[in-house]
Image: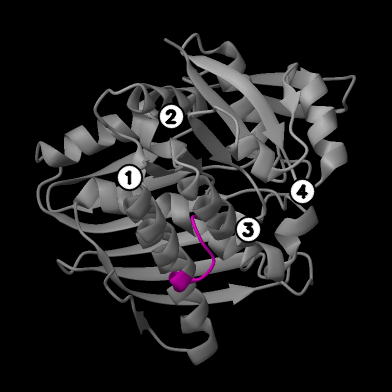
Amino acid sequence: MKVKVAIMSFAHLHADSYAHCLKSNPRAEFVGIADHDTARAQAKAQQFEVQAFDSYESLLASDVQAVIICSENVHHARLAQMAAAAGKHILCEKPLMTKLEDGKAMLAAAQGAGIHLFTAFPCRFSPAFQQMKRMVESGAIGELLALRGTNRGSNPGGWFNDPELAGGGAMIDHTVHVADLIRLLTGQEITEVYAETGNNMFHGAFDDTAMLTMTLQNGVFATLDSSWSRPKTFPTWGDVTLAAVGTRGIIEMDMFAQYLVHYDDRAGRIKQVFWGDNIDYLMVDEFLRIVAGEARQTLATGEDGYRAAAVAIAGYESVRRGAPVSIPNL
């Protein structure tokens, strides 16, 4: 039996990818779209040949079983609590929240309603990362000492450059993916963060570059370049890399290294065309399986999303203080 799914808002760039995943997945019945931008809802509904609901309330009053939330970050908590109250399972775009209290309210709403709340962390599904995890766990590099990560992309523009809607800039946008991978790889919580940010790329009222040093509960430390430092001419949107340093070796992972090089005279640029597994599809597929009754394997929970976002939120507090900041336990 197919799972009836709808998308709440197309504000986030990833909504289009998730919509394509739903349309191409035989487990899904992509029912429709609601958006506070009603013109956008109509346009996207026409594009994907689904219903345009006139409000979030009307969508949630329908018989959809699950929703994917892709609004501006600041609206995640409100929409998730609405969906939970309506008994809908939720896959929420990252970062899960922009304030700790919002994240706690989302977790409480999901638990109280008895529904699943998941966070959209597709990088967990990368075969390169999963192989790295197996090698680290097998002892291939001995005892783990340190980690070095990057998540660098182009500036997405729009509301991403408005801290009131995004909760910050590049640091909150790009830290959460790698923070989640670090937690999953090590099985350890990140307990302290020191961060520095800058806005020298675009000179806006938002951070476009960030460097973080994180300490894990077992003493392992990690560094992360979390930035919108890729120019518009860069051949792809960005990267996710992670290096693990151990007592007997190093493993370096480049998540999106499987690509063709396209020299495009018509566009006047060189492009990297990724040919590896579609990790968005793998993530959405597991979400559908769970809603249908199968056990969770890889998909990030609401708590996972909370803990990753808490790292970025602590990073901004570290910038304000000019000192390391402890990350409170959930």
Label placed on residue 282: none
Using the numbered discs, state the Cα–Cα distance from disc 2 to disc 1 in whole angstroms: 21 Å
Q: Residue at x 85, y 29 (%)?
A: 43
Using the numbered discs, state the Cα–Cα distance from disc 4 to disc 1 in whole angstroms: 27 Å
- Looking at the rendered image, the disc whose residue lies closer to the viewer, 1 or 3, is 1
Using the numbered discs, state the Cα–Cα distance from disc 1 to disc 3 in whole angstroms: 21 Å
Using the numbered discs, state the Cα–Cα distance from disc 4 to disc 3 in whole angstroms: 11 Å
Q: Residue at x 44, y 41 (%)?
A: 87
Q: Is there CB contact under 8 Å for labels 4 and 3?
A: yes
Q: Is residue 20 left or right of residue 66?
A: right
- Looking at the rendered image, the disc whose residue lies closer to the viewer, 2 or 1, is 1
Q: Which sits earlier in the primary sequence, circle 2 or circle 3?
A: 3
Which type of secondary structure does the marked residue at label 1 adopt? Answer: loop
Q: Is there CB contact under 8 Å for labels 1 and 3?
A: no
What amino acid is labelled 1 in the image?
Gly
Q: Is residue 39 left or right of residue 204?
A: right
Which type of secondary structure does the marked residue at label 3 adopt? Answer: helix
Where is residue 109, by image quadrant? bottom left
Name the residue tied to disc 3. 75
Name the residue tied to disc 2. 283
Tell me where residue 20 appears, x and y as whole percent: 63, 21
Mark 4: give few (<14), some (14-19) or many (20+) Cα within 10 Å: some
Using the numbered discs, state the Cα–Cα distance from disc 2 to disc 3 in whole angstroms: 22 Å
Asked whether the viewer can see residue 9, the reply is: yes
